Image (cartoon, grey):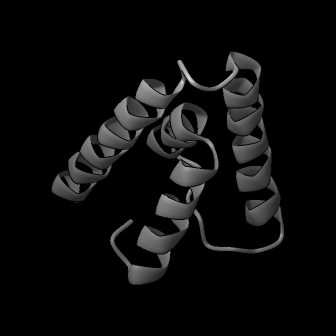
């Protein structure tokens, strides 16, 4: 199980790096709003009954990557890797 979490973390770090490479072209407010919206969406999905585990790792991934991280967490949850 720890291998899967490390893999997810590495994927999230790569995605975060790519996002921050694009930050120069984007407004930082948009990136912050994307992260906040991703966290709120994660909490709403969890409240609606989706089987997404609210672990610290999942919250950090969504906080750093926003909707991209949320999509990654959802896909990995439905595949059964998280």
Where's the N terminus, which quadrant? bottom left
Residue in the foreground of this view, choosing between 57 and 72: 72
Residue 76 % position (x, y): 41, 69
Quarter-of-image position of residue 79 = bottom left
Residue 26 % position (x, y): 64, 26
Is 20 located above or below residue 19 in the figure?
Answer: above
Is 1 located above or below residue 81 in the figure?
Answer: above
Q: Residue furthest left?
A: 3
Residue 52 % position (x, y): 59, 65
Q: Residue furthest bottom?
A: 79
Where's the C terminus, which quadrant? bottom left
x 82%, y 62%: residue: 47
x 47%, y 34%: residue: 19
* Direction from residue 35 to residue 73 in the image, left or right: left
Is 14 located above or below residue 26 in the figure?
Answer: below
x 31%, y 52%: residue: 8
x 52%, y 50%: residue: 69
Is 72 located above or below residue 5 in the figure?
Answer: below
* Direction from residue 14 to residue 72 in the image, left or right: right
Q: Residue furthest front?
A: 25
* Direction from residue 31 to residue 10 in the image, left or right: left
Residue 11 % position (x, y): 30, 48
């Amino acid at each position: 199980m720890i291998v899967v979490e490390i893999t997810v973390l590495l994927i999230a770090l790569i995605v975060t790096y790519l996002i921050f490479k694009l930050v120069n072209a984007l407004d930082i407010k948009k990136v912050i709003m994307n992260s906040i919206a991703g966290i709120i969406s994660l909490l709403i999905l969890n409240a609606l009954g989706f089987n997404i585990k609210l672990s610290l790792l999942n919250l950090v991934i969504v906080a750093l990557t926003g909707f991209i991280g949320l999509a990654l967490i959802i896909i990995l949850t439905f595949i059964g890797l998280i």
